[in-house]
């Protein structure tokens, strides 16, 4: 692309009388041409293919399942058809799937059915056996310092009757420590009940963090756990029926990476979206929308000239705590990190009750320290401004969303290198998940106040029909604008690219949400 600047502007810049723009700007022709080429119709076709894949593979595209593998095949095939040479970045991860709902019932002395749930990475089993409380604190009282250490030490299980069900209480250490100690003591199952202080009374269902526990592990509320403990203390033999059916093992999955043929390999714009769904559904908004949008942008970008390299990335295992993007970032050398100018992330851009959210890169709306918000690396504010300026130019409202690292930009903003001592700049778009749309937002963006931005978030109903054509069209245009903008110039985001003479390898890289409750 050709760029021109008047002699007067050149002189004023040299004299320091005219400041550089705070964010990079694409040539209007480039942005318009790419946005016209990236059609809603084609993006929806990609989403339909993802839906077809899920339909043929048990209703899911989760990493570690055939549905994800077929999604990878589709993306790779489309990229190759447009002249890319995509590479697969393999890594191992802890896979978990619940095959049937957990069962927890008291069979004696008084038959009682309890509300329960399976802990993530629980083993499978069907057990009926007496229950033994393990160093529990009942009653707990209201003192927040009156914390349970139940099951945190192997000594807690001294004399534990092998084959019994261990009843342990939340508190002090991770659930995995309690469960592994119980398993080592011969427990046939583990029931974890909540601690009991205000805010810690409801049914507790958490995660064990990784495979390794082979017995069933389920949750219980404080009141139900206390009732069982008091029966045992009164001399009753309380028998519990505990049943879980799970898959919990280490599996291998991949990220898909594809670099443009054109552009400086020492000034790389990484454009990412996670390709996996949750186990529960096909994930056509979360995140078939972002994956389909950047796929179509990549296919159309193959026809454009631009001075900077663009690396498109489809991340695996995002739904299990950003594992694919983290594995990729952790594999990079300092030189490879230095070569990355910025990361753009597109995770859910077609929510049916959408808002046009932009990541708050300069932390002006959500200061660090509030709600998990992280400080944006220098340059992140310029990325945010590029999006907000674009929406303004189109007569569209937008608003900031917290920069909290809850999607695949998270590993980029927390990694460091000589060129990025405070993290790699990042930004992106989001149309909302489980949050509730306000009346003020409904007045600006349309839709329905008082319900979630995506009522099918992480559910089986996140299908092809779970979509706003208007929102997806607008957000994919904004994404295309930002991608071509930074493919042409990263001015305002980074001071300078990596040394031009440095050779940066872009292939054969070694691979290997707040809703995860571990303690």
Image: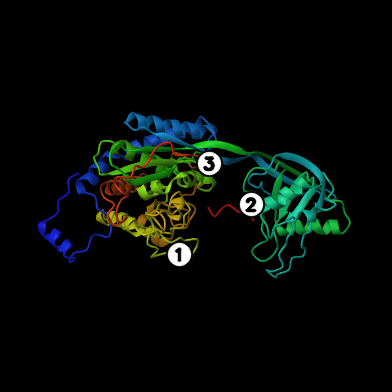
Label located before the other in sequence (1 or 3): 1
Query: Camera-side residue: 367 or 112?
Result: 367
Label located before the other in sequence (3 or 2): 2
Residue ID at (34%, 33%): 84
Circle 3 residue: 460
Circle 2 residue: 206
> What colouring style does the render use?
rainbow
Query: Camera-side residue: 226 or 215?
Result: 215
Query: How busy is the neighbourhood of tag 2: few (under 14 within 10 Å), some, or many (20 plus)?
Result: many
Query: How busy is the neighbourhood of tag 1: few (under 14 within 10 Å), some, or many (20 plus)?
Result: some
Q: Position of residue 378 (x, y in %)?
A: 36, 59
Numbered circle sitting on residue 28 = none
Q: Position of residue 266 (x, y in %)?
A: 32, 45
Callout 1: SS: loop
Q: Position of residue 423 (x, y in %)?
A: 42, 56
Query: Are the residues at dot 1 and dot 2 in contact (C-beta closer than 8 Å)?
Result: no
**Spatial CA span between label 3 and label 2:** 21 Å
| Residue that sits furthest to the bottom in the current view | 143
- The picture quadrant where one finds residue 362 is bottom left
Residue ID at (68%, 65%): 197
Callout 3: SS: loop
Query: Camera-side residue: 497 or 319?
Result: 497
Numbered circle sitting on residue 368 = 1
Q: Tell me if residue 274 can be seen.
A: yes
Query: How busy is the neighbourhood of tag 3: few (under 14 within 10 Å), some, or many (20 plus)?
Result: some
- Labels 3, 2: front one: 2
């Amino acid at each position: 692309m050709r760029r021109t600047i008047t002699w007067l502007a050149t002189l004023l810049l040299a004299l320091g009388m005219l400041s550089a723009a705070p964010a990079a700007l694409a040539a209007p022709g480039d942005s318009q041409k790419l946005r016209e080429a990236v059609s809603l119709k084609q993006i929806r076709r990609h989403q339909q293919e993802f839906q077809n894949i899920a339909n043929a593979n048990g209703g899911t595209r989760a990493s570690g399942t055939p549905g994800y593998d077929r999604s990878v095949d589709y993306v790779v095939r489309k990229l190759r058809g447009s002249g890319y040479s995509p590479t697969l970045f393999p890594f191992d991860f802890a896979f978990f799937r619940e095959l049937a709902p957990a069962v927890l019932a008291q069979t004696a002395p008084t038959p009682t059915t309890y509300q329960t749930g399976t802990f993530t990475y629980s083993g499978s089993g069907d057990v009926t056996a007496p229950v033994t409380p393990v160093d529990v604190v009942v009653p707990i009282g209201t003192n927040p310092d009156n914390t349970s250490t139940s099951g945190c030490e192997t000594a807690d299980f001294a004399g534990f009757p092998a084959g019994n069900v261990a009843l342990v209480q939340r508190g002090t250490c991770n659930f995995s420590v309690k469960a592994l100690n119980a398993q080592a003591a011969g427990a046939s199952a583990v029931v974890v009940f909540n601690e009991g202080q205000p805010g810690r009374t409801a049914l507790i269902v958490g995660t064990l963090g990784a495979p390794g526990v082979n017995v069933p592990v389920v949750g219980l509320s404080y009141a139900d756990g206390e009732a069982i403990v008091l029966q045992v203390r009164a001399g009753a033999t309380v028998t519990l029926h505990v049943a879980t059916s799970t898959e919990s093992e280490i599996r291998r999955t991949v990220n898909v990476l594809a670099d443009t043929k054109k552009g400086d390999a020492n000034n790389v714009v990484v454009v990412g979206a996670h390709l996996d769904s949750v186990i529960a559904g096909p994930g056509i908004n979360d995140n078939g929308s972002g994956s389909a949008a950047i796929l179509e942008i990549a296919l159309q970008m193959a026809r454009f000239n631009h001075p900077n390299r663009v690396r498109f990335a489809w991340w695996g295992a995002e739904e299990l705590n950003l594992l694919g993007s983290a594995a990729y970032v952790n594999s990079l050398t300092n030189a490879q990190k230095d070569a990355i100018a910025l990361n753009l992330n597109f995770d859910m851009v077609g929510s049916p009750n959408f808002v046009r959210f932009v990541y708050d890169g300069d932390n002006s709306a959500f200061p660090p320290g509030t709600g998990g918000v992280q400080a944006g690396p220098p340059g992140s504010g310029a990325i945010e401004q590029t999006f907000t300026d674009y929406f303004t130019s189109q007569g569209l409202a937008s608003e900031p969303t917290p920069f909290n690292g809850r999607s695949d930009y998270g590993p980029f903003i927390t990694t460091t290198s000589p060129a990025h001592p405070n993290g790699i700049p990042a930004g992106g778009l989001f149309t909302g998940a489980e949050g509730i749309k306000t009346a003020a937002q409904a007045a600006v963006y349309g839709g329905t106040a008082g319900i979630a931005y995506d009522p099918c978030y992480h559910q089986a109903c996140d299908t092809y029909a779970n979509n706003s054509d208007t929102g997806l069209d607008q957000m994919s245009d904004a994404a295309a604008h930002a991608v071509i903008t930074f493919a042409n110039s990263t001015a305002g985001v980074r001071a300078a690219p990596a040394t031009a003479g440095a050779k940066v390898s872009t292939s054969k890289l070694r691979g290997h949400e707040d809703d995860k409750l571990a303690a």
